Image (tube, rainbow, N blue to C red):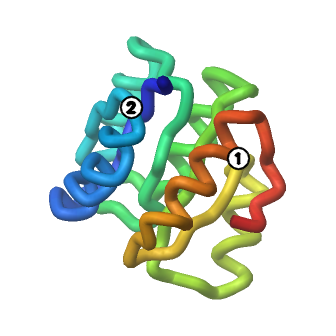
Amino acid sequence: MAKILVVDDSGMSRRTLRKILEPEGHQVTEAADGIAALEHYYIDRPDLVLLDLTMTGMYGIEVLTKMREMDAQARVIVASADIQNSTRALAENAGASAFINKPFAMAQVLNAVSIALRGGADGTV
């Protein structure tokens, strides 16, 4: 189905998302930090990115901004345990297609992925 880049400094989070996405037919590539994510994005041009907001080294919003500079149509779902409205607004203002909460709920992830791949960007997932 879709090529999806999962970006999270937590190996457990990356494995969880892989276990949710691969059975649905998606091809998953992982990156553990922002620099690796940008390299993967530049080379592979995935259909969708699932991006952790809080990572060591490069903050998720910075990664999102750089991806959008490379590709204005980049589809990026931001994930965070921080559920404050201001955090969600920050992600949406930076161009996120959607915002999902951690810990991951399978239905929420699959719904957000489905909407983003169809081109939706309402941020209400």
- State the separation of the CA atoms marked 1 and 2: 16 Å
Identify the residue position indicated by label 1 in the image.
115
User: What is the quadrant of the C terminus in the image?
Assistant: bottom right
Task: Please identify, in this view, whether the residue under mark 1 or under mark 2 is nearer the observer.
Answer: 2
The relative height of residue 72 versus residue 63 in the rendered view (above or below) is above
As drawn, is 22 to the left or to the right of 77? left
Q: Amino acid at mark 1?
A: Ile
As drawn, is 67 to the left or to the right of 116? left
Are there few (<14), some (14-19), or many (20+) residues within 10 Å of tag 1?
Answer: some
Q: Residue at x 16, y 57 (%)?
A: 11
Q: Residue at x 26, y 59 (%)?
A: 16
Question: Can see residue 33?
Answer: yes
Q: Earlier in the sequence, mark 1 or mark 2?
A: 2
Q: Nearer the viewer, residue 56 or 99?
A: 99
The relative height of residue 99 versus residue 25 in the rendered view (above or below) is below
What is the x, y in percent for residue 113?
A: 58, 47
Farthest residue, direction top: 43
Element type where label 1 sits in the image = helix
Q: Amino acid at mark 2?
A: Gly
What is the x, y in percent for residue 3?
A: 44, 25
Identify the residue position indicated by label 2 in the image.
25
